[in-house]
């Protein structure tokens, strides 16, 4: 139970993506603004990714796959449990299983 | 040994099931996102580009869809294994506060009531300041009368978000299963090595036993030879 209270304030889903992805997800109701702090960003930024991963109230960071590609090193280096980072496809870039980190792991497991 | 092999097979089966489920969820999400983007584009066509862009986002928006994190306890091993996300609609704070103490919720109700009064008459400033939670639908940022396609788009994105949460949960579970698999595999390797060593030892033992046997046989032969030699010597002496 103690661990549960530690996550209590981590509730937000953040998103970094192109305008349509962000608009869509904000329509779904994940947007949250508190003073100068917001949990979404249209189009890429290294600083924002760092900021989101450092914040204590974000549980999940969604990032467009093609944007993650630009800051690949940063995304791959992020190995903490929180916030969880998930790469999502965008309108112009379809979901590519080849780039999926989980499926890569699977290949590695069976490739041995 | 057989026990471990069985366990490995079982885990592998579960693992593959999870992966297939994971891929299914991605397919589901892609479908929803595609429809969502399509409806969004349609709304843009109807409303005009400038009426449906990031400039229309509400600068004071409050999240009405959030997630709850809870550690998942494995029923078999009874230890914290992976993290589970649950999608929550509505304000988390509200529901939590309501759970924490019921009296505050009644107070709040009274307070909101006062707030309405205040709005009407614009007086009674002695009430404590209250934070009004904005529960506006994001749809309203873009106007009061939005095209149905935008509403449709919102529905698809909401569905897509559910898939996203499922994907994340499945991913955590997959990683967890993978770790379990690796541990078992290592154990299996160790067992195989131990078995090998045991068999080698057995072989050596057998060899030693054989050598011992041969030595004893040789000894017997030697004794026999010595005896025959003695006899021959005796015979010679007699002669």
Image (cartoon, rainbow, N blue to C red):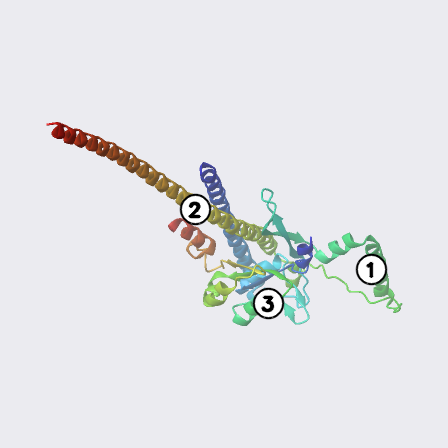
Chain ID for label 1?
B
Q: Which residue is mark 3?
A: A54
Q: Place residue A40 in its image quadrant.
A: bottom right
Please tell me which residue is depicted at 16% across the width and 29% down the height of the picture.
B234
User: For the residues marked 2 and 1, what is the alpha-carbon distance in whole angstroms?
Assistant: 67 Å
Q: Nearer the viewer, residue A41 or A86?
A: A86
Discs 2 and 1 share one subunit:
yes
B239 over B191 or under it: above or below: above
Q: Secondary structure at mark 3?
A: helix
Pointer 2 chain? B
- Above or below, B195 against A90 in this view is above
Tell me the residue at 22%/34% (across/down).
B222
Alpha carbon of mark 3 to alpha carbon of mark 1: how far? 35 Å
Q: Locate residue A13, reporting x and y percent.
A: 61, 60
Mark 3: give few (<14), some (14-19) or many (20+) Cα within 10 Å.
Answer: few
Disc 3 and disc 2 on one polypeptide chain: no
What residue is disc 2 on? B190
Q: Residue at x 50, y 50 (%)?
A: B179
Q: Which residue is mark 1?
A: B112
Q: Residues within 10 Å of mark 1 (few under 14, many from 20)?
A: some
Mark toward the viewer: 3 or 1: 3
In the image, A74 versus A36, the foreground residue is A74
């Amino acid at each position: 139970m103690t661990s549960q209270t530690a996550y209590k304030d981590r509730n937000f889903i953040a998103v970094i993506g192109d305008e349509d992805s962000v608009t869509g997800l904000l329509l779904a109701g994940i947007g949250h603004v508190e003073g100068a702090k917001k949990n979404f960003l249209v189009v890429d930024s290294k600083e924002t990714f760092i900021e989101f991963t450092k914040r204590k109230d974000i549980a999940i960071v969604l990032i467009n796959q093609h944007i993650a590609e630009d800051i690949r090193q940063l995304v791959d280096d992020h190995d903490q449990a929180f916030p969880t980072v998930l790469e999502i496809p965008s309108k112009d870039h379809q979901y590519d299983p080849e780039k999926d980190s989980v499926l890569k792991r699977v290949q590695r497991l069976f490739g041995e | 040994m057989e026990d471990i092999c069985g366990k490995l097979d079982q885990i592998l089966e579960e693992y593959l099931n999870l992966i297939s489920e994971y891929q299914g969820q991605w397919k589901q999400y892609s479908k929803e996102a595609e429809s969502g983007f399509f409806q969004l584009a349609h709304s843009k066509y109807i409303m005009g580009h400038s009426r449906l862009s990031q400039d229309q986002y509400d600068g004071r928006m409050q999240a009405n869809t959030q997630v709850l994190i809870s550690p998942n306890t494995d029923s078999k091993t009874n230890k914290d294994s992976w993290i589970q996300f649950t999608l929550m609609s509505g304000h988390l704070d509200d529901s939590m506060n309501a759970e924490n103490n019921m009296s505050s919720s009644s107070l709040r109700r009274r307070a909101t009531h006062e707030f309405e009064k205040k709005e009407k008459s614009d007086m009674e400033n002695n009430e404590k300041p209250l934070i009004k939670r904005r529960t506006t639908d994001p749809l309203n940022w873009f106007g009061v009368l939005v095209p149905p396609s935008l509403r449709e788009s919102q529905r698809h994105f909401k569905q897509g978000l559910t898939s996203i949460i499922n994907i994340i949960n499945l991913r955590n579970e997959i990683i967890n299963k993978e770790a379990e698999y690796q541990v078992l595999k290592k154990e299996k390797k160790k067992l195989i090595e131990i078995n090998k060593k045991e068999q080698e030892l057995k072989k050596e033992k057998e060899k030693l036993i054989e050598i011992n046997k041969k030595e004893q046989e040789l000894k017997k032969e030697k004794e026999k030879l010595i005896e025959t030699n003695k006899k021959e010597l005796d015979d010679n002496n007699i002669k």
